[in-house]
């Protein structure tokens, strides 16, 4: 089985070159990676040029495709172009562990068709370390897109992929549906993700807004309501 890595980006010039380099270095065997698909949602920085330049003279197929903005739309677009039996969705500022491809394939060979890694932030703030500690538990409440998501292409198609009505919370919605059919495993290795958003806004302020979004969703808020809150409280801050 081979993996298609799908990375949605929007103005990720600061991190995308580092991530692509990491993916080639951290792979246990590049032959297990059939392609890396970078899906741009309309970047106005140097992200696209960086991906094009990096893709030259690589031992792995790196594809740059374009989509309407919105992470769910971008990831679904990437999945439609993917040819691997396993899809691995990855944020541009999250760096999977060494041998990530072997860990994913091992789980699929055990008939675990979907799951994620544990996660830790690149920060020593005690609350962020606590959030990382929580990701070891088999609970959908401890999941998030920064942990990345692997899923077989057949299962992804069966559950109709990401719900594009979600501008935020799209990762959690997918996880909710996978937990509902008992199709989720947590690999006991750590992906490292950037704490930059917490550092920019402040840990407690951003955490409050994230918890508010989760509570609103649990109480039945629509995808439009969640995005409106996110746009007003997080993006505009």
Image (spheres, helix red, strand yellow):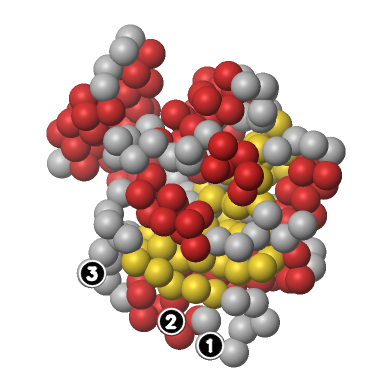
The answer to whether residue 7 is visible is: no
Q: Name the residue under label 3.
A: 44
Q: Quadrant of the C terminus?
A: top left
Q: Are marks 2 and 1 in contact (CB under 8 Å)?
A: yes
Between 186 and 87, which is closer to the camera in this rendering? 87
Report the residue marked by disc 2.
52
Q: Can residue 115 be seen in this view?
A: yes
Between the residue at mark 2 and the residue at mark 3, the CA separation in whole angstroms equals 15 Å
Residue at x-position 49% and y-position 63%:
81
Quadrant in which residue 202 is drawn = top left
Quarter of the image for residue 5 reads bottom right
**Which dot marks residue 56?**
1
**The quarter of the displayed image where residue 182 is located:** top right
**Residue 18 higher or lower than 224, as above or below:** below
**Mark 3 vs 1: CB contact within 8 A:** no
- Few, some or many C-alpha atoms within 10 Å of disc 2 (few <14, some 14-19, many ≥20)? few
Q: In this view, does 18 lie above or below 208?
A: below
**Mark 1 falls on what kind of element?**
loop
| x, y percent for residue 1 | 77, 57
Calculate the distance from the C-alpha at mark 3 to the C-alpha at mark 1. Answer: 21 Å
Q: Position of residue 20 (x, y in %)?
A: 55, 69
Q: Residues within 10 Å of mark 3 (few under 14, many from 20)?
A: few
Disc 1 crowd, CA 10 A, few/some/many (<14, 14-19, 20+):
few
In this orientation, which residue lies closer to the viewer: 213 or 121? 213
- Tell me if 188 is positioned left or right of 38 in this view: right
Disc 2 and disc 1: Cα gap in Å? 7 Å
Pick whichever of labels 2 and 3 is earlier in the sequence. 3
Q: Left or right of 56: which side holds 196?
A: left
First in sequence: mark 3 or mark 1?
3
Between 217 and 123, the residue placed more toward the observer is: 217
- Position in image of residue 204 (x %, y %): 35, 27
Using the image, determine if residue 221 lies above or below residue 224.
Answer: above
């Amino acid at each position: 089985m081979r993996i298609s890595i799908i990375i949605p980006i929007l103005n990720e010039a600061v991190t995308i070159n580092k991530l692509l380099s990491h993916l080639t270095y951290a792979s246990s065997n590049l032959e297990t990676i059939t392609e890396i698909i970078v899906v741009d949602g309309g970047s106005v920085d140097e992200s696209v040029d960086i991906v094009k330049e990096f893709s030259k003279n690589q031992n792995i197929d790196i594809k740059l495709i374009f989509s309407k903005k919105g992470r769910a739309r971008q990831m679904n677009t990437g999945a439609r172009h993917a040819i691997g039996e396993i899809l691995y969705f990855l944020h541009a500022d999250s760096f999977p562990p060494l041998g990530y491809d072997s860990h994913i394939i091992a789980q699929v060979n055990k008939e675990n068709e979907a799951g994620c890694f544990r996660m830790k932030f690149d920060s020593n703030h005690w609350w962020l370390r606590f959030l990382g500690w929580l990701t070891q538990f088999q609970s959908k409440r401890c999941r998030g897109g920064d942990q990345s998501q692997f899923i077989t292409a057949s299962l992804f198609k069966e559950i109709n992929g990401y719900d594009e009505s979600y501008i935020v919370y799209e990762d959690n919605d997918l996880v909710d549906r996978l937990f509902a059919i008992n199709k989720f495993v947590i690999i006991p290795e750590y992906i490292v993700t950037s704490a930059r958003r917490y550092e920019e806004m402040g840990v407690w302020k951003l955490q409050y807004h994230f918890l508010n979004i989760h509570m609103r969703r649990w109480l039945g808020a629509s995808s439009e309501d969640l995005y409106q809150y996110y746009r007003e409280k997080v993006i505009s801050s």
